[in-house]
Every structure is written in structure tokens, then in C-alpha cells.
Amino acid sequence: MSKQAVFTMKLEPELRADFMAEAAAAHRPASQVLRELMREYVRQQREAREYEAFLRSKVEVARSSMRAGHGRSNEDVEAEFATRRADAEREA
């Protein structure tokens, strides 16, 4: 990637000094470390948004199904599985 943009930020002198020392200890330029941190942040944010959209669509599908009368109540599901558990205990 071409490095044509400049990013300026304000931070505490102690944080800058600690960061620069850690980057030097890792034998890496601070700018490279910051680029990696920024890329990781961007990736995480995109994944979080995509997952949120996925969940919203799944919830909407489920709500539509329930509105159309295709769902089952929690009580029905609990009753069915209580019966299954009882059957499994008798078989054991």
C-alpha cells in the first residue's frame, strides 16, 4: 500500500514514550505497529457490524415466522423436551 497520508494525533507524553520504547524493543518502527493496530481495529469493527447485521436478519426472519404462525411457544417447547427427558430417563 502506498503511504501518502499523514496522521497526527495528540497523546500523553508518557504513553508516547512507553509506546516508542516497546516498538524499539520489538525492533519495529512505531509507524508499522500503528498501521497494524489500525488495520486490526478496522477489521474488528467491520466484523462486528457484519455480525450485528447477520443477527438482525436472523431475528427478523424468526419474528416473521412467528407472525405467520409457524413458531412454537416456549411452553410448548419446554413441554416437549420435558417429555423427551422423561422418556430418556425411563430408557436408561
Image (cartoon, rainbow, N blue to C red):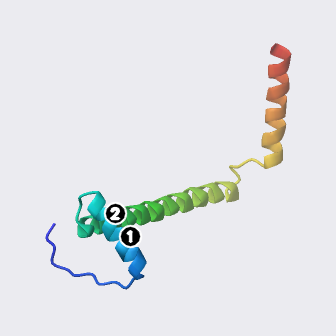
Residue 13 in the image, given as x and y percentages of width and height: 39, 81
**Label 2 sits on what residue type?**
Glu
In this view, 55 is above or below 80: below
Q: Which residue was labeled with disc 1? A: 18
As measured in the structure, the alpha-carbon distance from the residue carrying label 1 to the one carrying label 2 is: 6 Å
Which residue is label 2 attached to? 22
Proximity of marks 1 and 2: CB atoms separated by less than 8 Å? yes
At label 1, the amino acid type is Asp
Q: Quadrant of the C terminus?
A: top right
Measured as percent of width and height from the top left, residue 20 is found at 31, 70
For the point 43% across and 66% down, which residue is it? 45
Quadrant of the rendering where the N terminus is positioned: bottom left
The foreground one among 63 and 56 is 56
Task: Out of 23 and 44, give the one closest to the viewer.
Answer: 23
Q: Nearer the viewer, residue 81 or 30?
A: 30
Image spot of residue 46 (x, y percent): 40, 64
Q: Is residue 3 visible?
A: yes
